[in-house]
Amino acid sequence: MSVIDACVAVKWFLPESQSDLAETVLREDDVRIAPEHLLVEVGNTLLRAHRADAITLDQARASVSALGTLIQLRPIHEIADAALQIASIVGCTHYDALYVVAAERWDAALVTADARLVRQLQTAQ
């Protein structure tokens, strides 16, 4: 089982650096999960891409809709408090800490393309 963060998921819809690596996650025979706020994070990134004329609004909407078929979304209410604590220790954002806690809580590997988060986690250890 893998927890997918927004940095990886957005690469499935927008051509970015390491999009090819993100696509390998889709080809793997593994259960993909994410805290439900993934929809908001990916949606916001796609909206910015639309406003920059990189994609159409219909493409953004279709991409957000597709997330529900690509990833099992999990509620955040049961991990939000623990994520606040992790965020305060690590120095990351609350929404990034939700992915970290989700991986711990659901015994899954965290799959991220967020180099800053990785550095913060390594520094905190």
Image (cartoon, rainbow, N blue to C red):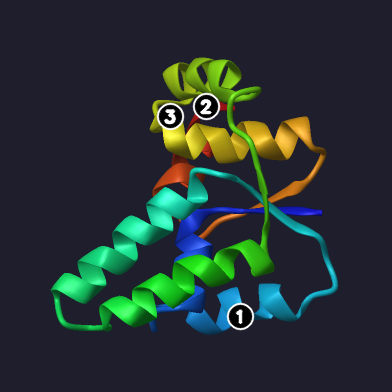
Q: In this view, does 32 lie above or below 40?
A: below
Mark 3–mark 2 Cα distance, whole angstroms, equals 15 Å
Q: Is residue 67 above or below residue 75?
A: below
Relative placement, left or right, of 102 versus 46 is: right
Q: Is mark 2 on a helix, strand or loop?
A: helix
Mark 3–mark 1 Cα distance, whole angstroms, equals 26 Å
Q: How crowded is mark 2: few (under 14 residues within 10 Å), some or many (20 or more)?
A: few
x and y, in percent, of residue 26 in the image: 69, 76
Please give the name of the residue rendered at 22% of the width and 83% of the height, measured from the top-left corner: 54
Q: Is residue 3 above or below residue 42?
A: above
Residue tagged 1: 23
x and y, in percent, of residue 84 in the image: 48, 19
Residue tagged 3: 94
Q: Is mark 3 on a helix, strand or loop?
A: helix
Is any atom of residue 16 visible in this view?
no
x and y, in percent, of residue 120 in the image: 45, 36
Counting residues from the start of the chain, the first of labels 3 and 2 encountered is 3
Give the amino acid at mark 3. His
Residue tagged 2: 124
Mark 3 and mark 1 residues within 8 Å of each other at the beta carbon: no
Which residue occupies the foreground of this view, 55 or 30?
55
Quadrant of the frame with the C terminus: top right
Q: In this view, does 27 lie above or below 100?
A: below
Q: What element carries label 1?
A: helix
Mark 3 and mark 2 residues within 8 Å of each other at the beta carbon: no
Please give the name of the residue rendered at 55% of the width and 84% of the height, measured from the top-left corner: 20
Please give the name of the residue rendered at 40% of the width and 51% of the height, measured from the top-left corner: 41
Q: How crowded is mark 3: few (under 14 residues within 10 Å), some or many (20 or more)?
A: some
